[in-house]
Image (spheres, rainbow, N blue to C red):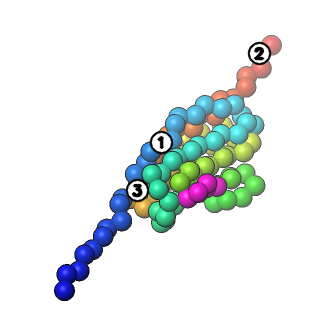
Amino acid sequence: LLLLCYTEEEAVIVSGLKNTDVFVGESATFTCELSHPGVKNVQWWLDGSPLHNNFVTEISEQDGIIHTLTLNDVACHDSGTVTFRAGSLISSAKLLVKGISLLD
């Protein structure tokens, strides 16, 4: 009796996060594309803190492949490193929130 074991191909990041600059009050969107769906333990982080889906933080996925994070109405203190983790895969990018200075 011959048993053949097929291991599922490891998913890879096809398109990672990109550094994003926005102004205070705008939205910042980060997208990460995986080679195929079914990756477990998908999580978004901002400066080491896990993010959760709510009215300010929108987390979505399309076909299990395209993962999107949108931070709405950002403030200066939201600047930092955004990290996407899916299993052992990690992609990071910088978010820079620029203030609007009013000159006299």
Q: Are marks 2 and 1 in contact (CB under 8 Å)?
A: no
Q: What SS does tag 1 mark?
A: strand
Kind of residue at badge 3: Ala
Quadrant location, the N terminus: bottom left
Q: Are marks 1 and 3 in contact (CB under 8 Å)?
A: no
Q: Are marks 3 and 2 in contact (CB under 8 Å)?
A: no
> Along the polypeptide, which appears first: circle 3 or circle 2?
3
Tell me: residue 14, above or below residue 42: above
Q: Which residue is mark 1?
A: 15
Asked whether the viewer can see residue 32, the reply is: yes
Residue 8: % across, % down: 36, 65
Instruction: Inspect the magenta stretch and tell me whether residue 90 lies in it.
Output: no
Q: Nearer the viewer, residue 6 or 72?
A: 6
Q: Which residue is mark 2?
A: 103
Extreme-bottom residue of the structure: 1
Extreme-right residue of the structure: 104
Kind of residue at badge 1: Ser
Q: Kindly identify the residue that appears in the image at 75 percent across and 55 percent down.
A: 55
Tell me: residue 71, above or below residue 4: above
Residue 18: % across, % down: 52, 36
Q: Which mark is residue 11?
A: 3
Density class for disc 3 (Cα within 10 Å; few <14, some 14-19, many ≥20) is some
